[in-house]
Image (cartoon, rainbow, N blue to C red):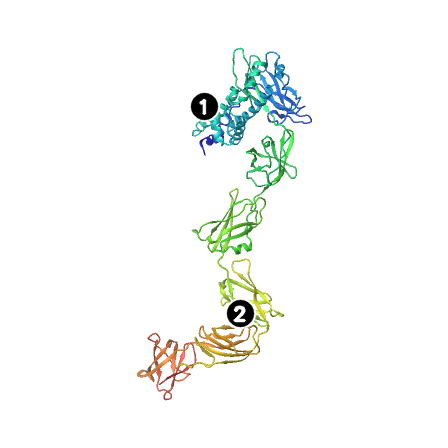
Amino acid sequence: MTVLWTLLLLITAISSAYATAEPLCPGGAAVAHFRLQVQRPGETRWLALETLKGLRKGDTVSYVPSDPVPGEDQSKAELVLLLAPQESQALVVLGRKPALGRQQWMIPADAAVVALAYGPNGWRGDRLETMLRRDPEMLTHLAAYGARTTQVEELVDAMARRDPQNLEAALRGLAVGGAGGARLDRTATVDQQTLTMLRTLSPALATYDPLTVEPRVRWQQSAGLAAAVAGLFLGNTVTVAATSATLFLNLRTVAFPRTEFRSALRREGALCGKPAAGSGVRFAYLWARQLPSGAGPSLALAEPGHWAEGMPGKVAFAGATAELGQVQRWRWVDAGGGMTPVVGAVREGTLQVTKPPPPGTYSLEGEWDWQTVRAAGVVTVYGWSAWEAMRLEAASADALQAGKGRVRLRLTGADFQFVTRVEVESMTDRLAETVVARFVAEKGPVRDFEIEVDTDRLREGAHRISLTRTDGAKHGFSAMVHGELPQVTGLPLVVRGNGVAQRLRLSGERLEQIERLAITGATVEWTRERQEVVVRLMPGAAAGVERELTAWVGGRNVPLRWAQAVRVLPAAVSVVAVQRAAQELGSVELMESEVEEGSLVSVSVRLSGPLAGDQPQHVVRCGTMERAERTGPADWFLVVRPEGKPGCVVTLEMEPGGAEVAVGKVIRRPVLTGFVLTAESAGPGRFWGELTGKYLERIARVGWDGQEGLAVSELPTGGGQKLRIAVPWPAPTPHAALYVWLRGEARGRRTTAKD
């Protein structure tokens, strides 16, 4: 901020303790106290002449003297009212009247300028009316003087009242005709114009120090600035009102011999001038006012107003607003016709309201003299919305997912039109950055508020979305930033329409997040731990129809849906015959119902009919399908590799939900490569022996038959390659086969090891 702008602001920054010390007439003194009022035919109200916009034929101007102050003598004072008509070029001079007592003049023609000549000691001779009418230039000079008087009054009033907003308007008015011979640049800043004006009017004003700290000194300087400007106008008309010099010369030398005219200003019922005394010279004061011509302006709001309760606002008007500042007594008019005065003022071409009316819809109107001027358009004042019900829409709450880039979310549950800022911050990580959301501010009620959030800057977890509004109030609510959604692969699932429950296994990622599943036209049981689903189609399910799979995910409002994710096929074919290829015996006995873990098992299956589709999907549990080949219309050759924990039953579903084929139970057998029985005694009727091979840790007992055996007390050495065992002796028969019990089994298995 420049020093000069600081100067202007300091004019307004005066302590209230010194407010009462403001002089009534800065730069001069009150030479008389009176009111000038106007009444129009048909109207009952009297309006102050100083605020009037037009003076028409038939109006009555009333002079009402105030109670004289001590020392004020009005016994010899006289008044003359001068009019500059709007159309005629002849100056109108109304009759002289004494200043003591009420006086009235009837206006004979519409006037562009009205002036009052006040002679404290009266006039010499009776030549006033005659001489003024004979001077054709007097009209032009009076109009210029009236315009300049109005501008200087506005400037002095703005300075005296410490109002920088009105000061700017007054400066720009002076720029039209120049100030003190120096023309102001209308495009320059206010501080530049002020500098030009101060330097031109009085070099003494350069001593003004805007940085003075002591409040009383600052006030004295600011008040002195208004007084200096007013004094220049009141004491020397050539300086500020340069274009009116001829007027004063004519008045003094032609109409009023031995009468010296001084400029005058009107402030709060006082006529302000520069009192002076001179030998044989009568002093008189001339006050003039330029009156705008034409009827009241046609006003319309540039756009509907939407304001918050208790917050200041501006009303912009469409089209020309030159007359806007001349509209008086602005008021709000509600829908029922009730009126509330406007708290504010016209500045910079807008009506700036410091305090709006209570919530409601209002039109604006003011007064142009006795005419009411109503502006087209309305201003709606809204009460503050209750934000407790504010929330994210269900779909938007689910869309708030970390790492998805810029995501648009929709908020509901309140009126968001006065929101100024939206932030998303973590509730669990104090080091996480606060993300500011983007949005477009809208005018009028906003029930669905759309924001855009950069989710690449968010982490999964609980967050808080906070909104700030124009009055600084802040409110927020919690929201969850989600991780990635579950993904189901291997779709479509195939379900047979045979009316029985069918067990299906889902594949994909993050399936543990799924809490519930549903399939159209079926009942579903979901086991999250095994990621299996049991499906039972409802009666009458049509074959060949693809159905929707719906999943409810924890923490989300809207379920996931996969269209055409379940295919319904006709009733499954049955298994007619199963043949399993013989397996290698190995060194430890393998039961008929068992299959060796990791070894390939060949199976031939004959069905009651062909499977649906050219490439049916075979389902294997506790194993993997290594090969599936059709060998006939209903015959299949399959190769399966058993996998999983011991005891897990390897089964085949020829197609999902179809007939099941049991292949065998998974077993893990040790491999024996040698057995030696030593002569070392292990106790009564026992001798130590040694087994060699692999996976010997699986052996729990040994013996010569499958019914009884001795427990193995030692652990295998060499990484499971040698195992020391106690064997009963003697053997039941020469070269008897050794039996071993695997851990957890109650029956021994015959081995290829012999004594």
For the residue marked with disc 2, what is the amino acid?
Answer: Leu
Which mark is on residue 736? none
Q: Position of 228 compared to 330: left or right?
A: left
Name above or below for residue 267 compared with residue 187.
above
Of helix, strand and loop, which one carries label 1?
Answer: helix
Q: State if disc 1 and disc 2 touch (CB < 8 Å).
A: no
For the residue marked with disc 1, what is the amino acid?
Answer: Pro
Give the residue drawn at x 51%, y 43%.
472
User: Which residue carries the number 1 mark?
Assistant: 203
Which mark is on residue 504? 2
Q: Foreground residue, 428 or 536?
A: 536
Name above or below for residue 588 compared with residue 14.
below
Viewport quadrant of the N terminus: top left
- Within 10 Å of disc 1 (Cα), the crowding (few <14, some 14-19, many 20+) is few
Answer yes or no: is residue 82 visible: yes
Give the residue drawn at x 50%, y 81%.
579
Q: Where is residue 81 drawn, in percent x and y?
A: 62, 19
Give the image quarter of residue 309: top right
Q: Foreground residue, 639 or 225?
A: 639
Q: How many marks?
A: 2
Q: Position of 423 compared to 37: left or right?
A: left
Give the image quarter of residue 353: top right
Q: Residue furthest left?
A: 680
Q: Where is residue 397 drawn, in percent x and y?
A: 53, 55
Q: Residue furthest right?
A: 42
Of helix, strand and loop, which one carries label 2?
Answer: strand
